[in-house]
Amino acid sequence: MSTLEIRGLQVSVKLPEGDLKPILAGVDLTVRAGETHAIMGPNGSGKSTLAYSIAGHPRYEVTGGTVTLDGEDVLAMSVDERARAGLFLAMQYPVEVPGVSVANFLRTAKTAIDGEAPKLRTWVGELKSSMEKLQMDPAFAQRNVNEGFSGGEKKRHEIVQMELLKPKIAILDETDSGLDIDALRVVSGGISRVREAGDTGLLLITHYTRILRYVKPDFVHVFVGGKIVEEGGSELADKLEDEGYERYLAGAGPAKA
């Protein structure tokens, strides 16, 4: 059973003028394979900073704490090493990659992670099946990565990646943003299939509870001022839906993501 352990994580963002602005103020979190954790909080609380710091975004500098995956030091790894170790990030704003087809991108990524290329016939079937489950036209496999995709198509493609790459820990940064209700159901179904397999720990970052109606979390963490200020089960999400974040904001730090 894979485990991501975050202890005392402190992170600053690099400003254009070269200064560092503190964002995360000591985060403690453990995510195990088969568990679903929801990180909820208002804008500017540091949720996305947490995601990008774990993934290794160069704009964010870790100033304290540790992050380990199955006992291995994640912070000592390059971005590609983190991916090969089993970390996956579904981005809030997926980028376009001109000149690289979806099919080539995914097969190359799978080969890098597994250390050997998947058998072509089997791989083509798996890719087609995953895209159909996410209600994506299989013709998208021959299109450039995210180029000309709608917002919903980009988010569906992120979940196709997660299903095929089978990470140990998947971080989904506001995957629900910009989705209409039908797309939300489809994307949530893909997340649930990964969850039900039991091999992946999920960290869902969101502002709202709507995705949690379809993907019920085992744990909910309230994130304010660059740290976790309350934890609970799925009932905590319902409480946030009713009461909002106002009671947590008094005295919260100035962190902005």
Image (tube, rainbow, N blue to C red):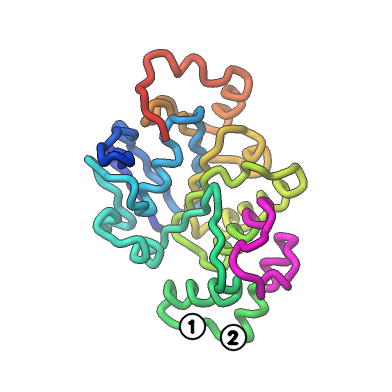
The residue at 57%/24% (across/down) is: 240
Residue 132 falls inside the magenta stretch: yes
Give the CA distance from mark 1 to mark 2: 8 Å
Q: Is residue 237 above or below residue 175?
A: above
What element does badge 2 sit on?
helix
Highlighted range, magenta? 128-155
Mark 2: few, some, or many residues within 10 Å (few <14, many ≥20)? Answer: few
Residue 244 falls inside the magenta stretch: no
**241 or 174, which is in the foreground?**
174
Contact (Cβ within 8 Å) of mark 1 with mark 2: yes
Outermost residue to the left: 64
Q: Is residue 162 left or right of residue 50?
A: right
- The residue type indicated by label 2 comes to Leu
Q: Is residue 39 above or below residue 87?
A: above
Residue bearing the label numbered 1: 117
Residue 144 lies, in percent from the top left, at: 61, 70
Numbered label attached to residue 52: none
Numbered label attached to residue 120: 2
Outermost residue to the front: 17
The residue at 56%/73% (across/down) is: 99
What element does badge 1 sit on?
loop
- The residue type indicated by label 1 comes to Ala
